[in-house]
Image: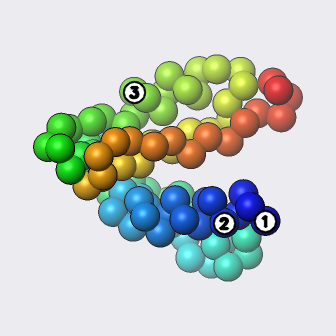
Amino acid sequence: TEANFAVSMLLRRHAENDVGVHPIDLRRGRLRVVARATEMLTLSTGKNVAPAPIEDAFAASDLVEQCLVVGDEQKFVSALIVPNPAGV
């Protein structure tokens, strides 16, 4: 599906530097983040960004079930957001 392709592209571009991903779950069509590589992202511009406060702000919403911020060695950060079906 388009959503699976988008997640795949996001992971290919960002996640190898930012997070640990369980490869068996990817083969089953699921994504499970098992660890963050670092608690600070360093953008290609040299700016340091702490992803946890951004993720926590999104997660505080009833509309969001999960949020993952990535962007190490990129010009900007991106977020993978899983909506909360009960809140939407």
What residue does disc 2 label?
Answer: 5
Relative horizontal placement of residue 10, taking residue 4 as reference (left or right): left
- Residue 69 drawn at (x, y percent): 45, 42
The quarter in which the N terminus is drawn is bottom right
| 70 up-or-down from 59: above or below | below
Q: Nearer the viewer, residue 54 or 36?
A: 54
Say what amino acid the circle numbered 3 marks.
Pro
The quarter in which the C terminus is drawn is top right
| 12 up-or-down from 10: above or below | below
What residue does disc 3 label?
Answer: 53
Q: Tag 3, which secondary structure?
A: helix
Quadrant of res 4: bottom right
Q: Tag 1, which secondary structure?
A: loop
Mark pair 2, 3: CA separation: 27 Å
Q: Nearer the viewer, residue 76 or 18?
A: 76
| Count of numbered badges drawn on the protein | 3
Residue drawn at (68%, 42%) of the image: 82
Mark pair 2, 1: CA separation: 6 Å
- Is the Cβ of the residue at disc 1 closer than 8 Å to that at disc 3? no
Quadrant of res 5: bottom right
Mark linked to residue 1: 1
Eye-nearest disc, 2 or 3: 2
Quadrant of res 18: bottom left
Within-10-Å neighbours for mark 2: few <14, some 14–19, many 20+ = few
Eye-nearest disc, 1 or 3: 1
Coloring basis for residues: rainbow
Relative horizontal placement of residue 1, taking residue 25 as reference (left or right): right
